[in-house]
Amino acid sequence: MSQSQRHHHASGMDKRGVAFVLSGAFCISFAAFFVKGAPIDSSMVAFYRLFFGAIALFTVAVLQKAPLRIPRQCLGIIVLAGALFSGDLIVWHKSILYVGPGIATIIANFQVILLAVFGVVVLHERLSLPQKLSAPLALVGLAFLLGIHNQALPAGTITGVALALLSACFYASYVLTLRRTQSIGLKMAPVANMAWVSLFCCIFTGLFCLANGLSFAIPDVRTGVILAVLGIVCQSLGWVLLSIGLPHLTPFRAGLLMLTQPALSYLWDSLVYGTATEPLNIFGAALAIAASGMGIYSPAGKDHRPTPETPASGRYPPPSSQDKVTHIREREE
């Protein structure tokens, strides 16, 4: 395969990855809207989000006749993904109690910086100057969008910031682990893969709720419907789309794309709950979008060779034997 053919192949994978990750972020952006409408403890909302999500995913997997058996060599990484996402949900919800949703969301989205560091240090990804500037600019835009400048910091700010930073670590680790589950030759469809991840995450979150003496009772039908939709749309559909798209993008680009999630969440909050929107909020949204686009579509640094990983999900054709030989030679060089 020629260099131009390889570049075209990689670009095609990037376009598919961008489409899937953006679609997934769009679905997940409704999570805050549903969480607001559920009158139960935030940790219980997380549990039922995962519970209903797992039920929906297993149902779809059975209807598709997708194999549900987990290959023995992949069990550990799937369990780890569930534990990491459970930790992210629990810690982030707690950070909101100390510093509010705006600041907690901004700090938690430092995951894009952590993913960029991982890409550079571990994967030896070379970032161009526009890419290096894009992540900080996107976070500044997100700060203006969510109105961090208007929020008075309550007591316990240090604790809240620390929890939000821990949430960012959990989230970045989860994204990388989820990306790995679909790029290590795992012979599972994305739906089956996410079904198991959601189930293990549900178990870890449920154990946390039990340890804290929380009630698992759903107070009324309306709350049950909200929790079911949250699980089906945000957990099932959203994360399946993300799990398909993540292996086709570098961690840095994936992290930038996922910043669209809090921006869209703010938009739904404004439209449904009437959250006040000021010119600075609009400027922040424009800056975040522009910075993300700059980082996603800017050429990579000099000598960077994109090496998208193709998941064994049946969604995309596997590389030919010649592609594999060429890829091995490039890595050896």
Image: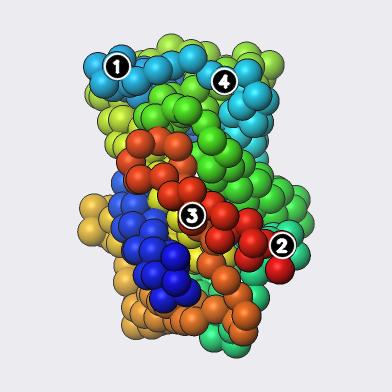
Residue type marked 1: Lys
Q: Position of residue 156 (x, y in %)?
A: 73, 52
Q: Position of residue 63 (x, y in %)?
A: 25, 17
As helix, strand or loop, the secondary structure at mark 4 comes to loop
In the picture of the structure, the residue carrying the numbered disc 3 is: 322
Label located before the other in sequence (4 or 1): 1
In the picture of the structure, the residue carrying the numbered disc 4 is: 71
Residue pictured at 56% horizontal, 60% vertical: 326
Circle 2 packing at 10 Å, graded few (<14), some (14-19), many (20+), is few
Residue type marked 3: Gln
In the picture of the structure, the residue carrying the numbered disc 2 is: 332
In the rendered image, which quarter is residue 235 located in?
A: top left
As helix, strand or loop, the secondary structure at mark 2 comes to helix
Residue type marked 4: Pro
User: Which mark's residue is nearer the viewer, 3 or 4?
Assistant: 3
In the rendered image, which quarter is residue 209 located in?
A: top right
- Establish if 326 lies above or below 55: below
Q: Quadrant of the C terminus?
A: bottom right
